[in-house]
């Protein structure tokens, strides 16, 4: 197709290099997919914007090998402290709760770090993979083929995008025509991609006006290093501690503070960081907060709650992140939802581009992530109303308790679909099909090394088959024979995968025995269930007793003595659970979205 | 002094860029000290040599911010497995023990990684600090001033070293005369620096001959990912698992294997990796080990056990690492002992060069580290004899149990000296004065963040004052008043330090209360004990219950309700403990090795 030097082909073109675009681009580059990413801004942002990373996002970043640096640079938030109007005037502390009370969380806290520093983590990792962002480059036109056959062929280039370089030299051709297999619009709340697809944002704007300002300031509020949620007679105020000694204030503003009565719109000349800060100072009385030497990033906004009507056109152009959903920033959900969109789509697109998965797999992106965005908006309606209103401590607190689990991101559950099958949920009742699998320490048999399960189910685009074998000790009933048979049948299931090579590129296998480490060698597991010595684990306590929950995998996951096979999707969510006698179901599950080979399977399954 | 372009001054010249030289150079560069490091070898080593890093070395690397990468790259060793001759012929497994059974260890395992990869961690960190190794450069002459006044003046340059560039171009002057304040000989077992100082190695050579070979090989020994200590009728053999799938074999050799009977010396033409491997293969029967496609690094050695008669001349030239001590490599102690030498000396030299400490402080290096080397040799005599002899399982095992604690490096205890004062040991009976302080999770009051104490006592050349305040809750007897008074007296002690500025460059203060987090604000601590909000901690359980031992600091350390002040040296070892009424002793302690200002102290100490 390319006919001139200013025409080119690319597998995936990503528009926008914020957290959503970078999460996506990094994931694809790591998967070895041909990807380009363009961005309007000339420079990385230096401060401000989004800053909250929740427990689930940390797990996701960890699965890409990016959490170490985040944890080194970020501020940790362990507590949320509530202040309410005091009978003596001003505010008083009324309650303190853990930021993340979920016991199944790998990270028992949230972190804050300015968006530019988070973007830098992706940018540096991408650089190591040979991918850099093409800055000052924007799409100016996009055209999609109407040919059904072309649209359904993952190897076709049905999307034509004209890119313009904003900083082209006078003697340079400023435009380039790119033929893309797929285009990702990660270009924010005012998404050009979304607009060219004529996708509507559904929802409405609230009456709530807020200001936000970053700074370093002395204060005698003893909780200023926890999130403070403050209801005062002067309006609400949130304190969000940041990296170093920095603080962010979210400050509720009145119409008088911000509106131009003649136009009914926000008047940006009316209020700046100094005015926002002065409102906060009043709300914080009797506590003192010193006027900082200088203010950092600040802005004023009216909370709107909207979700895009669709997330894709023809499953060839997708939108992710703020292009899909807008809501209030105080709950710190925006960047997390955006990165999770990309995390959900990236492995699907990689498997389709490799020819391993059917292109229909891509439909599940909108199904899963739009449903989540609607839940998020519904949460946000309640949260923003409570944050912006005079409510009793009890009222707010009760609602908050309900929400604190939601904001961790750990309870997102995808509904049944081609890739989520909850038929056999009862076979491992605490592994919730559709949710991300919980962390769990296991012991590797060959070297007795404790391993966090999450460090085994990394984001390498592969499904992880967790084979819980039960106790196959010699003399233990017939479990050994059952596992031998399971191994053979499972390999029948796997053999159908991998149309362009072996199944090992698509599925990684991990075996977890319920025997005791001291009574087991890794060689006791059938050879078909140990492609390498590093693949065999046991559910036993670690030798030093340093790891909470080690030796409780079967108990924590609700796994019966008969054993079970758990399918963890490449994004860490549980796709399905299969008892040993349901390998035919496993075959059907994978055939539902993966391209399969016709494999002769001998005497078939389900004959335990 | 420099008179020509080929003359220069430097504060510290380090000769040798192995683990000892790099640990030292990195520490000094991090401390902002002017340092140069020269090395004979043209390239970083790529494989082989030392590979074992024990639990204490990991703690030390962590204190410099270098453990993360080590843990990412290294292989972990959690178990040691013993094999003995079997009655049925060949060998059989007789016992398995944890590699590190110490419950007070931050790392419950050891790691292996080839020396070149460990050196790369230092080299990259040094590069970030602007320091690179000058390769193919060797000292050819060294001359030290005999002027007492000059030798006692830390700002003088009493050591003249002529360096030669081995790769000088024909038109280049190949030599340079360097005037150094201090010189460090980190140039290995055949140390040129040691020889020019005419320091003798004391000790002797054993009769034990061993070969060592690195490789990747298939084997059916199920424990090949643990350390295997094998006594067979064919001689002893150790299997050491390495990074990736690599293994190292240490193989006991007979005189016939290695010696030239005509000379009585090792004949290097007689035995190579293939021959070493063949001896091992016989010793491992009935287990199989496949001949690898290629062998990695290998060598043959006769175990010798020697310690240098002195570690310094005039405390201006020092030797560290293998230049000081040689012993058998199988216990994996060499690189650890070498890095610990440098860790011990680096902070002392930094404080002397800054003018904060008296030059006499440097004497403690030889006192502390030579004593340790003698202990190491004494351990090694017993260990090497047991490893090289036919002993019963029980005999070896009993001895091993005694040694496994030693090899972790966690129990090294420096004796009383100018910087170790055990007078008040009873005031915190589980904090062993002279040993490194044990890990302990604390909660930071301002943000409820759990912190490992070891991450607070980082290797920044500063002493850490841990002020255990006890319970100062209002209404709790007079502890609040006692702490207020302690704060004032302690500042009297600190005020005498820092002849060229404030004491904050020399001492960091950390306050640890025994109150409950929920009942305490960080502002409850006297201002003199909280230079920043981040300095106030509480001994309470972490909110999520994820950290073993949190909330038990007072119990684990044996601290009484009256509180205590613990002085942790910059290398993590406990220097002294002072009850609140012993601030006069604290004053005397610091004055014993630090340069002090004359400070008026009001009504003095010891009046509780």
Image (tube, coloured by chain):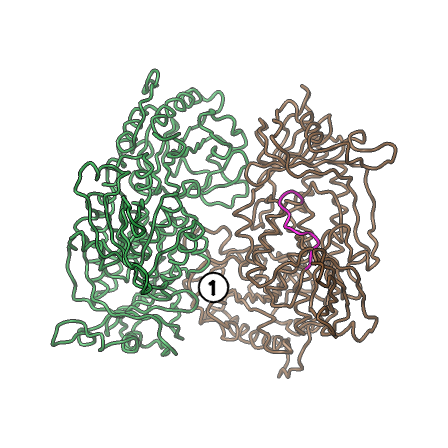
Chain colours: A green, B brown
The C terminus of chain B lies in which quarter of the figure?
bottom right
- Relative depth, front residue between A355 and B498: A355
- The residue that label 1 is drawn on is B515
Image position of A427 (left or right of A309): right
The N terminus of chain B lies in which quarter of the figure?
bottom right
Q: Chain of mark 1?
A: B
Q: Which residue reaches farthest top?
A: A603
Give the magenta range: B38-49
Q: Which residue reaches farthest left?
A: A262
Q: Is residue A89 visible?
A: no
* Residue at the spot 19% in from the left edge and 73% down from the top edge: A254
Image position of A139 (left or right of B510): left
Question: Residue B462 at what x, y percent from top left?
Answer: 60, 67
Q: Is residue A477 above or below residue B361?
A: above
* Residue at the spot 77% in from the left edge and 68% down from the top edge: B159
- Relative depth, front residue between A516 and B469: A516
Q: Main secondary structure of the magenta part?
A: loop
Image position of B355 (left or right of A269): right
Question: Residue B27 at what x, y percent from top left?
Answer: 62, 61
Local crowd at mark 1 within 10 Å, few (<14), some, or many (≥20)? some
């Amino acid at each position: 197709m390319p006919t001139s030097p200013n025409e080119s082909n690319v597998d995936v073109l990503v528009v926008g290099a914020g957290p959503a675009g970078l999460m996506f681009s990094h994931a694809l580059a790591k998967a070895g997919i041909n990807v380009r990413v363009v961005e309007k801004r000339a420079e990385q942002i230096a401060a401000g914007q989004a800053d909250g990373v929740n427990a689930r996002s940390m797990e996701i970043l960890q699965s890409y090998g990016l959490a170490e640096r985040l944890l080194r640079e970020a501020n940790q938030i362990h507590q949320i402290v509530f202040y309410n109007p005091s009978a003596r005037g001003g505010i008083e502390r009324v309650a303190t709760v853990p930021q993340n009370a979920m016991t199944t969380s790998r990270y028992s806290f949230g972190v804050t770090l300015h968006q530019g520093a988070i973007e830098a983590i992706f940018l540096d990792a991408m650089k190591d993979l040979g991918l850099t962002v093409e800055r000052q480059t924007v799409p100016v036109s996009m055209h999609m083929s109407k040919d059904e056959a072309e649209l359904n062929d993952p190897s076709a280039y049905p999307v034509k995008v004209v890119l313009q370089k904003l900083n082209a030299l006078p003697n340079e051709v400023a435009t380039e025509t790119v033929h893309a297999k797929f285009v990702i619009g990660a270009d924010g709340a005012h998404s050009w991609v979304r607009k060219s697809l004529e996708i509507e944002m559904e929802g409405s704007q609230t009456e709530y006006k807020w200001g936000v300002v970053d700074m370093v300031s002395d204060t005698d509020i003893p909780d200023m290093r926890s999130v403070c949620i403050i209801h005062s007679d002067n309006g609400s105020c949130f304190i969000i501690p940041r990296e170093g000694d920095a603080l962010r204030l979210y400050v509720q503003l009145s119409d008088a503070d911000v509106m131009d009565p003649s136009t009914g719109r926000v008047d940006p000349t009316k209020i700046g960081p100094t005015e926002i800060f002065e409102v906060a100072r009043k709300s914080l009385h009797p506590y003192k907060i010193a006027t900082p030497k200088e203010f950092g990033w600040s802005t004023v906004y009216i909370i709107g709650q909207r979700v895009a009507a669709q997330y894709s056109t023809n499953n060839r152009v997708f939108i992710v992140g703020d292009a899909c959903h807008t809501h209030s920033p105080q709950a710190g959900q925006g960047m997390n939802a955006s990165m999770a969109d990309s995390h959900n789509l990236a492995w699907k697109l990689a498997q389709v581009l490799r020819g391993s998965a059917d292109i229909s797999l891509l439909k599940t992106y909108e199904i899963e992530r739009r449903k989540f965005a609607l839940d998020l908006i519904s949460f946000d309606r309640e949260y923003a109303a409570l944050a912006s209103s005079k409510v009793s401590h009890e009222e707010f607190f009760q609602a908050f308790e309900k929400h604190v689990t939601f904001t961790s991101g750990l309870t997102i559950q995808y509904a049944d679909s081609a890739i989520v099958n909850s038929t056999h949920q009862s076979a491992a009742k605490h592994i919730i099909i559709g949710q991300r699998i919980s962390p769990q320490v296991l012991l590797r048999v060959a070297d007795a090394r404790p391993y966090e399960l999450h460090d085994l189910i990394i984001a390498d685009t592969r499904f992880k088959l967790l084979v819980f074998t039960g106790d196959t000790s010699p003399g233990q009933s017939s479990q050994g024979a059952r596992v031998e048979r399971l191994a053979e049948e499972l390999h029948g299931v796997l053999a159908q995968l991998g149309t362009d090579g072996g199944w090992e590129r698509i599925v990684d296998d991990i075996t977890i025995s319920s025997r005791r480490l001291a009574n087991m060698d890794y060689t006791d597991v059938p050879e078909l269930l140990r492609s390498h010595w590093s693949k065999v684990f046991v559910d036993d306590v670690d030798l030093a007793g340093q790891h909470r929950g080690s030796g409780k995998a079967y108990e924590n996951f609700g796994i019966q003595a008969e054993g079970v096979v758990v399918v963890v999707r490449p994004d860490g969510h549980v796709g399905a659970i299969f008892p040993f006698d349901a390998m035919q179901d496993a075959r059907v599950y994978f055939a539902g979205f993966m391209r399969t080979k016709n494999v002769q399977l001998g005497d078939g399954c389900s004959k335990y």
